[in-house]
Amino acid sequence: MSPHGDPLKVLVMHNRYQIPGGEDAVVAQEVALLRANGVEVETFFVNNDGITTVAEKVLTATQVTYSWQMRTRAAQILERFKPDVMHVHNTFPLLTPSVYDAAHAAGCPVVQTIHNYRLVCLNGTLFRDGKVCTECTGKRVPWPGVQHRCYRASAAGSASVALMLVANRLRGAWSKRVARFLMLTPFARDFFVEHTDIPVEKMRVKPNAAADPGMGRGAGGYALFVGRLSPEKGISVLLEAARQGLGMPLKIAGQGPLEADVRESHFAGQVEYVGPQTPEKIRALMHDAAVLLVPSLWFEGLPMVIPEAFGAGLPVVASAVGSLSSLVDHEQTGLLVRAGDWADLAAACRRLASDTVLLRSMRGAARKQYLRSYQPAANLALLSSIYSELAPAASPLPASPSPTYSSLMPAGNSRSSIALASFPHSSTPMVGGGRSPSQGEGPPSL
C-alpha cells in the first residue's frame, strides 16, 4: 500500500451490462473524475457480450455464485498495482463476490457502490407485474422470486441468482468482506439496513455526480419527461395526466416499448413527442422547461435526470415512492405526488403553472441542491473522505468544497477549484437506450 505522501491508488472493478445504461456511464465518469484530480486509477472491467451460446450460459450459471477465475485475476492485479482501495460497482454475473476475497487476502479494503436492489431481489428492481414487489425481502431464501421466475422469466436462471444470494450471504461476503457500502440515497441506506445484515456503520450515502449543465431560465414554459418509455416509468400515468390537462404543454424525450402509445398521444400544443435526443439537446430542453416530471412506479435507484435537472435549476415533480421520496424535497426543490395517481400529477403541474413565485423559489433551491450534492467538486470531496477512512496513509485528494459547503458558487458558474473531468454525460444511455427494470443481466435463459 502507498506510504504517506504517495498518490492515492484505487482499483475500480465493474461488470458492464450487455445493454449500456446509466450505471455504466456513472462508473466511467467517476473514474474520469478521480483521474482528473490526481488519483492513480486502474480499472478491471468485464462484460457479458461473450455469453451467447447455451454452453456459455450454463457455464456462467455454474460460476455466478463464486468464480475462482475472477478471484485469481483480481489477485494478480492487486499484487501488481497494490491499490489503497478496491472500489467495486457491479459484480453480476461474471466478477462475483469472489473478488472481495482476493482483496481481503491482499489486505486491501473494499468499497462497494450499491446501484440497485440485487442483494434482496432476483431482478434487482423490486418491481413485478406492474407494481412494487417486496415478497423476497426478509426471507432467508428468496423462493417467491424463483416461483415467479423473476430473473429473465427463467426458473433455472432465477434459481441460480437465488443460490448466489443465499450462499454469499451465509458466508458473510457482504457483511464481512466489504468495508464501506456507498448508498445512492438515504432511502436506499434505510432500506438495506432494514432488510439485510449489512451493519449501518459501514454505510455511507454518496449520490452520483452530474456534469454541470449551467442554470437554465425555464423560458419555454413546458413540462418535460426524459427517460425510457416503459411501464415502470409511469408512462400511462403521464399520458393520462396530460389528457386531463397539466396547465402547460408536455414534451417527451426517449424511446422504449410504449413509444406507440406516446406517438398516439402526440397532439399540437399539449403533448409533443421529440424522440430520443443527444445529451446536448437534453440539456437545452431542461434549460427551457418549467418542470421535469418523474412519475415512476418503481423504487428507482438514482435516476440521473434528477441531478441533471437540479443543475439546470429545474424543479421536479416526482412520485412519492422509494428513492424519489428522498431525492425531491417537497415544496422546496419540487413536488411529490402519489405514485400511479394521474390526477395528483396533473394537479401538481397546474399548481406550478399558476404559482410563478413558488416555481421561481424552487428553481433556486434546485440549483443549490445540485451544488451541495451532485456537483463533481462536492461529490469528489465526499468520495475522498470515504477513501480516507480506509486509507489514511495515502495523500488526500486536492482541496475542494465540502459536500455541505454553505458558500455556494454563482448559479452561472460551472467551474470549481478542482479539475473537472470531461466525462460522458449520463443522459445518452438512458434516453432510448437504457434497460428496463424487468431486464436482468447475465445468462438470458438457462
Image (spheres, helix red, strand yellow):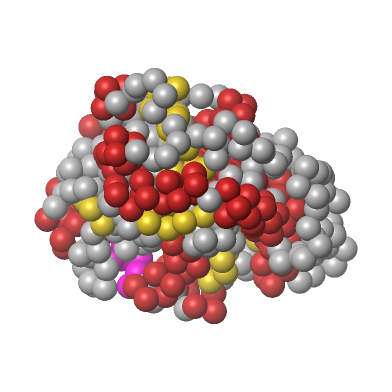
Task: State how many labels appear.
Answer: 0
In the image, residue 262 lies at what x, y percent?
31, 27
Q: Position of residue 75 (x, y in %)?
A: 57, 54
Q: Main secondary structure of the magenta part?
A: helix
Splitting the image into 4 quarters, where does residue 266 fall?
Answer: top left
Residue 402 forms part of the magenta stretch: no
**In the image, is residue 168 part of the stretch drawn in magenta?**
yes
Q: Residue placed at 32% from the left, 63% from the top? A: 120
305 or 69, nearer to the observer:
305
Q: Is residue 442 left or right of residue 151?
A: right
Residue occupying image coordinates x 47% and y 74%: 176
Q: Quadrant of the C terminus?
A: top left
Q: Is residue 387 left or right of residue 271?
A: right
Residue beneath the point at 80% across and 50% down: 410
Q: Where is residue 167 drawn, in percent x and y?
A: 30, 66
At a point 58% along the width and 25% down the height, the residue shown is 281
Q: Quadrant of the N terminus?
A: bottom right
Q: Is residue 395 visible?
A: yes
Q: Is residue 319 above or below residue 182?
A: above
Nearer to me, 414 or 207: 414
Looking at the image, which is closer to me, 446 or 185?
A: 185
Residue at the front extreme, as displayed: 354
- The answer to whether one can see residue 84 in this image is no
Q: Position of residue 13 (x, y in %)?
A: 55, 49
Magenta stretch bounds: 163-171
